[in-house]
Amino acid sequence: MKKIFLALFLLLPMMQVQAAVDPNFYIFLCFGQSNMEGAAKPEAQDLKSPGPRFLLMPAVDDAGRGRKLGEWCEAVPPLCRPGTGLTPADWFGRTLVASLPQNIKVGVIHVAVGGIKIEGFIRDKVADYVKNEAPGWMKGILEAYDNNPYERLVTLAKKAQQDGVIKGILMHQGESNTGDPEWAKKVQQVYDALCSDLKLKPEEVNLYAGNIVQAGGQGVCIGCKKQIDELPKTLHTAQVISSDDCTNGPDRLHFDAAGYRELGCRYGEAVARHLGFEPKRPYMEIAKPIEVPADAFIAETTVPGNDFPKVDKEGRAYFRIQAPQAHKVIVDICNKKYDMQPDGKGGFMAVTDPLVVGFHYYFMEVDGIRFVDPSTETFFGCCRESGGIEIPEGSEGDYYRPQADVPAGQVRSIYYFAKSTGEWRHAMVYTPAEYERGKKKYPVLYLQHGMGEDETGWSRQGHMQHIMDNLIASGEAVPMIVVMESGDVKAPFRGGDRGEYGSSFYKVMIGDLIPYIDSHFRTLSDREHRAMAGLSWGGHQTFDLVMNNMDKFAWMGGFSGAIFGLDVNKTYDGAFSRSDEFNRRIHYLFLSCGSEENFGTEKLVGDLRGAGIKVDYYVSPGTHHEWLTWRRSLKEFVPKLFRK
């Protein structure tokens, strides 16, 4: 039925008054296998229409793009079929448009089948090939051409001859016939049949045969190169288009987008010369390769065995990811998105502006899908597993780094059952280096992270264990146990009373966690030896828990604490208005923030001091709402604990 329709389709122009053939409409037939079909995803510059001087006569319908079989349209990829990619024909046409006079249009008819042998285009052998040789996965593609790609090419070419003049034939085929000594003769059969069926003069219509992926001599079908190079010995009107130095994808079988552009331009240049015109390359966006300076080093947060991410001495971060099928790749860090640049080998790279020192979360996006860079360690932050990178300080950051001569404590992962909620819960517990020796009991600091982070944040992003080890070893802090729990603030706030966010943790803290720690570790279990502090929303939780349980805590701290709307005369039953009582019961209150954040801490300190509350205030110079602020805050806070 399809063949009857196609025959009628061909007859329609003959039954109408025909317009004169335009001698300035140059038509080219394109056929072959997967590298003519197009295996690279078009990039932004490929999807910009070259305008009405470069046209495509589709060989199949493409409803999604409004294309109909046999009706000219602007030649924007995919030229072959829906779901195919960038082909040499794309930039072949653009090169001709740039090289030929303005009054000349270029049209292509494009029929290609990935993996097909040359027999699939030999007029007298197509039927046998489709029936007996074509693999099963190819059947659906062949059906798109009514199981005869040669006939589809000829049928459309005859229709196109009503509009313009066929000036050449482009082929990229041979991989599936690697090692076939008769391949060149078979190509000649296809060429001769096309010339015969379309009444073409061989001396006027060359065959342009593109060579295969070389991949520096490691191409999968490199053995086919010689037989393509020697094609003109058999077919004298054939011209081989070099693929030397054309870049390829990781499969070493198909070109990448840059390789298709280069090969397509070479096809176009060869045709332009044959037609008597000086070749001109169309404008092509070629990004300057990102150069990684020799002083750049692998970030400490990079998964061992990877070469990226890296950081240079100016604090710029360099990222790389392999994504050969990706169209657009982005790295999102420090509130800025950077477009990653394709390297022509299936990889993408980006370099950032100089970043401030400290720890930064970051994400990547491939074609709109957000994910964690597989080359970095993961950190729980932003309410999910996240990528992270450390931009190192100089020696001033040694306080949060392990030191060779400092005994190291341990960070233990524990699970405990919370009767108050009927669930197993997880916490991290730091014990000082000396804990393993003797039977001494220790005071306890309960240390909370912020909204969207978890109980591992302080030991992984905050390096609290190294801060504690160094302070204890220097005698600046008394040895203590530090307990870190999720606090029920890992998931984002989902509406309602914001003040209640994470409040489900309060009964767990008082009724389950503290009793568990006191019964499973050697603790000094009275209020005089128990402290609590937290960063951001953990600071909010600290105020709620300590102020409502002053029989359990005597020391408290808030680092960039989310303590909003506090009324010293009313909040917590007006406890701050009774300054003498508060100052007697709470031995030390510490508040801090970064100099570059605006979390209201300075006003809170002023209000508390105005009410007579003793509060120590620290501002971290040059930092925002970030882990470097909180590392510094912990360093300032801990030495004041548990001292009379």
Image (tube, rainbow, N blue to C red):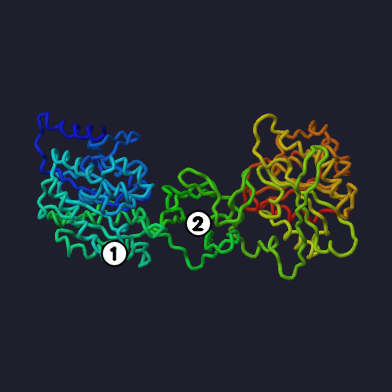
Q: Residue at x 31, y 61 (%)?
A: 178
- Crowding at mark 1 (Cα within 10 Å: few <14, some 14-19, many 20+): many
Q: In this rendering, does residue 24 appear at all?
A: yes
Q: 6 or 119: nearer the eye?
A: 119
Residue 263: quadrant of the picture: bottom left
Residue sticking out furthest to the bottom = 405
- Whichever of callouts 2 and 1 sits on the residue coming sooner in the sequence is 1
Between marks 2 and 1 in the image, the one whose residue lies nearer the viewer? 1
Q: 400 or 623: nearer the eye?
A: 400
Q: Quadrant of the C terminus?
A: bottom right
Q: Position of residue 167 (x, y in %)?
A: 15, 49
Horizontal side of residue 210 vs 497, given as left or right: left
Residue 357: quadrant of the picture: bottom right
Q: Residue at x 30, y 44 (%)?
A: 80
Residue 319 badge: 2
Q: Position of residue 314 (x, y in %)?
A: 52, 61
Q: Amino acid at mark 2?
A: Phe
Residue 225 badge: 1
Describe the element under mark 1 as helix, strand or loop: helix
Residue 569 badge: none
Q: Position of residue 15 (x, y in %)?
A: 12, 29
Q: 318 or 126: nearer the eye?
A: 126
**In this figure, what is the number of numbered marks?**
2
